[in-house]
Image: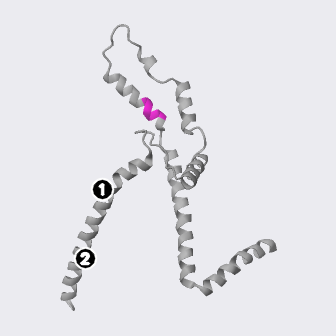
Amino acid sequence: MNIIKKSLYQIKRPWVAYKAKAPMAAFITGRLITMLVLLFLLGFSLFGLMELAPGDIVDQMMSQQIMSSMENSPKKSGSKSEDDLLMNEKQMAQLRAEFGLDKPFYVQYAKWLNRVIVHHDLGTSLISRAPVSFLIRSRIWNSVLLNLISLVFITLFSFMLGVYFSKQGGN
């Protein structure tokens, strides 16, 4: 127990000195650390929730294949049977291994987090097969424009409401 107290004291002592010298910098540093911890916990939780959802991307790909084979159901003589066109269990297991879905979600999250932090690679969309960073970049300007328009609208509306209620005074 004494070892833990000494270790915590050794960690706490420089922080207290830093806090005394630069309180604003210590406040900002504390907020940044809190933000990073919350971001990690939120990402981990969302990754875990996605694991709880029924099915995975391989099941979705299989259902898309079934739906497309039903749309193209008029059989021609000499064409392949439906069973030849659909994935079998071995192919599905191979795809799960390729995507890393056969590993626990915390291992998947650790690999994804490593890829994002170290290589700045958000991965590839499993549905559109395009890089996620490209998909974000192609849609970010619409989001920025929408946010700016809503910011201007809310600012003007709030200002008008503030003027209106300030004129009401003691009513």
Residue 57, position in %: x, y? 47, 37
Instruction: Count neighbours of disc 2 (C-alpha within 10 A) and say few if under 14, some if 14 to 19, many if 20 or more.
Output: few
* Location of mark 2 (residue): 158
Q: Which span of residues is magenta-colored?
A: 58-62
**Image quarter (top left, top right, bottom left or bottom right) of the N terminus:** bottom right
In the image, residue 23 sits, relative to residue 131, either above or below, namely below
Q: Seen from this angle, which residue lies furthest top?
A: 77
In this rendering, the label closer to the viewer, 2 or 1: 1
Instruction: Count neighbours of disc 1 (C-alpha within 10 A) and say few if under 14, some if 14 to 19, many if 20 or more.
Output: few
Between the residue at mark 2 and the residue at mark 1, the CA separation in whole angstroms equals 24 Å
Q: Seen from this angle, which residue lies furthest bottom?
A: 170
In the image, what residue occupies the spot 74% across and 76% down? 10
Q: Seen from this angle, which residue lies furthest right?
A: 2
Q: Amino acid at mark 1?
A: Asn
In the image, what residue occupies the spot 45% across and 17% down? 84
Label 1 sits on a secondary structure element that is: helix
Q: Which mark is residue 142?
A: 1
In the image, residue 110 sits, relative to residue 27, either above or below, namely above
Q: Name the main secondary structure of what is drawn in magenta.
A: helix
Magenta-drawn stretch contains 61: yes
Q: Amino acid at mark 2?
A: Ser
